[in-house]
Amino acid sequence: MKRTNPEPSASGAKKRRGEEDDEEVGCSHAAVEDGAVSEDQCLPLEDELTFSDTSVALRMMRAQFPRIDQASVPPFILQSQLYSSVNDRTQVDRELECLRREKVVRVFKLNTGQDDHAVIFLDDYLNQVDRIVKRMEEKKQSDLEIFKWFKGHVLDSKLEPSIGHHELFSLLSLGGNVKDAHITLLINAGLLTRQLIDPDMYWFAIPSIGKLWKGLLQGRNELLSLIKRKRHKEMFLAELEKKRLRFSPLDVRFHIRDLIGSGHLKTVQTTSGLIVRIPKD
C-alpha cells in the first residue's frame, strides 16, 4: 500500500525539508548510550505495542519516557496509554488499582480540561518532593517541616487523587502544628491544586507538569492533523513513529499510545505492517 502526497510547488521544497528534519530514528529522546534504555527497548513500536500486564507496560513506558530538558518532571504514563498497551481494559483498571493500593504508583488527575490521568511510580514522586525541599533549603525557605509531614502522613495514607481540606489538616497535624502558611507552601510548590468546583477540595499534583499540558494537547492535535491530511486518513505505524512533532516536547510514541488508548486512533494489521487510522464516525 503506497501513498503519495504531492505538495504545492510554492512551498513543496520547504515542506520537504521540514519533513526530512522531522525524521527520527531509534528510541524516544532517551539514548541507548547513556543507559536510559537498553537495546531491547528500542524495538519498533509495532513490536512492543502491547504487553502482558499493566506492571510490565508501566515499567517499559517509564524507561522510554522522553527526556525533557525544560521541565524537571518525573516520568509519567497516561492511563490512556495503558489502555493501548494491554488488550483488556478491565485488567488494566484492576491491576492499576492493586498497584495504587500497594503504594507502587500514584494516579493524578491532570488539569487539561479532558479526562486525563497520569500514573507515576511513587519512588519517582517522592524523589521529586525531596528535590523541591532541597531547592527551598538553598533559598533559606522557612516552614519546610511541612514537606516531611506531607510525605509521612498524607501521601502515605491518602492514596486517592484528591483530598478534602479538613482531612488534609488532620493528617498534617499528626506531624505538628499546622498553619495556613503550610498549605500555601504546598500549593506554591505544585504539590496541591484547589478544585475549581469545590475550593475545599484539593487535587494532588505533579510539580512542573503544567509546562507540558500545552504540549500534550498540541501534540495530540498535530499528530491527528498529520494523519488526516493523508489520502485515506491512515499511515503505517513504522512511518509515523519516525516523525518528530514540532509543537510537543513529548515524542511521537508517547502520543501514538495515548491516541490509540483514548480511541482517537485505531490499528489495523495488514500483510505490509500495522496501520493506524482515524476511526470513521
Image (cartoon, rainbow, N blue to C red):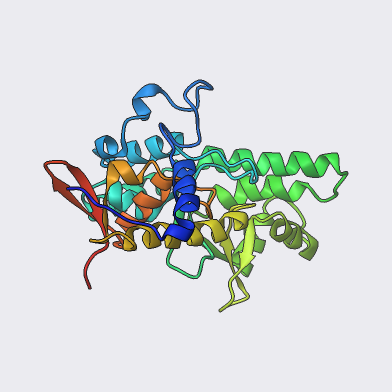
Give the residue drawn at x 49%, y 42%.
21
Relative to 162, is 220 on the left or the right? left
Residue 125 visible in this rendered orientation of the protein: yes
Give the residue drawn at x 54%, y 22%.
34
Is 144 or 169 nearer to us in this picture? 144
Relative to 64, is 4 on the left or the right? left
Residue 160 visible in this rendered orientation of the protein: no
* Res 170 → quadrant: bottom right
Image spot of residue 133 (x, y percent): 74, 43
* Res 223 → quadrant: bottom left
Image spot of residue 95 (x, y percent): 31, 47
Give the residue drawn at x 43%, y 58%.
9
Give the residue drawn at x 21%, y 45%.
274
Q: Is residue 193 above or below residue 136?
A: below
Furthest residue toward bottom:
197
Image spot of residue 187 (x, y percent): 70, 60
Image quadrant where one finds the C terminus: bottom left
Q: Is residue 92 above or below residue 60?
A: below
User: How many labels were placed on the picture?
Assistant: 0
Furthest residue toward front:
9
Furthest residue toward right:
140
Image spot of residue 244 (x, y percent): 46, 45
Is 259 or 95 nearer to us in this picture? 259
